[in-house]
Amino acid sequence: MKRAAIGIRMHSGWGALVAASGEGAMLDIIERRRIIMADPNICGASQPYHFAAEMPLPEAKKHIANCANRSERLAVTAIQTVVRELHSREYRVIGSAVLLASGRPLPILAKILASHPLIHTAEGEFFRTVFWKACENLDVPVTGIRERDLDESAQAVFGKTSPEIWRRISSMKSSLGSPWTEDQKKASLAASIVLAACGGRVQLSGARPSLTIDSV
């Protein structure tokens, strides 16, 4: 079986997921899809902290915990489907990468809900954490790469060929078609970094999302 890795760039309630195989000039994007991680049957599920900000704190905690529980189930199902479908095509998923924000520690929930900028930050971390936990539940190794460190991580793994690999990824729209935005490009680079690192080139030092859902 050929090795493959998943990369994802998260948004509120959904993520742009790609799967890549091969390395360098042989890099191949073998899957692209949008995966949904917010239950449409739960009010405010795509922006759980915005919705919770209008509630008393105990109810806010219950709402976020409920959203987290359901989002994790949706994420597990979505990732499991991707892994299964790739396996049927003779690809073995050996790892995944999730693009992270700055990684600054977030305060307690009451302080988050009192600050609109922190609400936005928390929601980003919420869905990145959901993806991370889903991968762990499925025994898919997961690495967090901060977006600001993406070029540095690529340089550490690919060395002098790093700019060429990014140019190759950026030019793939002509062969793959749409969508091929910054979401898919950066997720592809993250996946290619994981592929190369798992091949033994370099020890990749990953980060984790700064939000711990279980503590809400």
Image: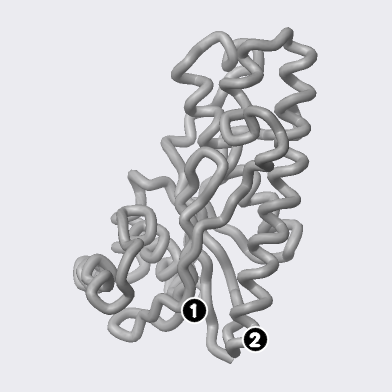
Q: The residue under label 2 is which amino acid type?
A: Ser
**Residue for badge 2:** 88
Question: Above or below — where is 41 with respect to 53?
Answer: below
Q: Earlier in the sequence, mark 2 or mark 1?
A: 2
Q: Does the rendering let one see residue 146?
A: yes
What residue appears at the point 36 percent right and 80 percent down from the top-left corner? 27
Question: Above or below — where is 132 with respect to 19?
Answer: above
Q: The residue under label 1 is which amino acid type?
A: Gly
Q: Please identify the quadrant where the C terminus is shown.
A: top right
Q: Position of residue 207 (x, y in %)?
A: 52, 47
Question: Above or below — where is 45 with respect to 17?
Answer: above
Q: How far is the residue under mark 2 from the one under mark 1?
A: 22 Å
Q: Position of residue 112 (x, y in %)?
A: 57, 16
The residue closer to the viewer here, 164 or 39, is: 39
**Residue for badge 1:** 199
Instruction: Give SS at disc 1.
Output: loop
Q: Position of residue 36 (x, y in %)?
A: 59, 51
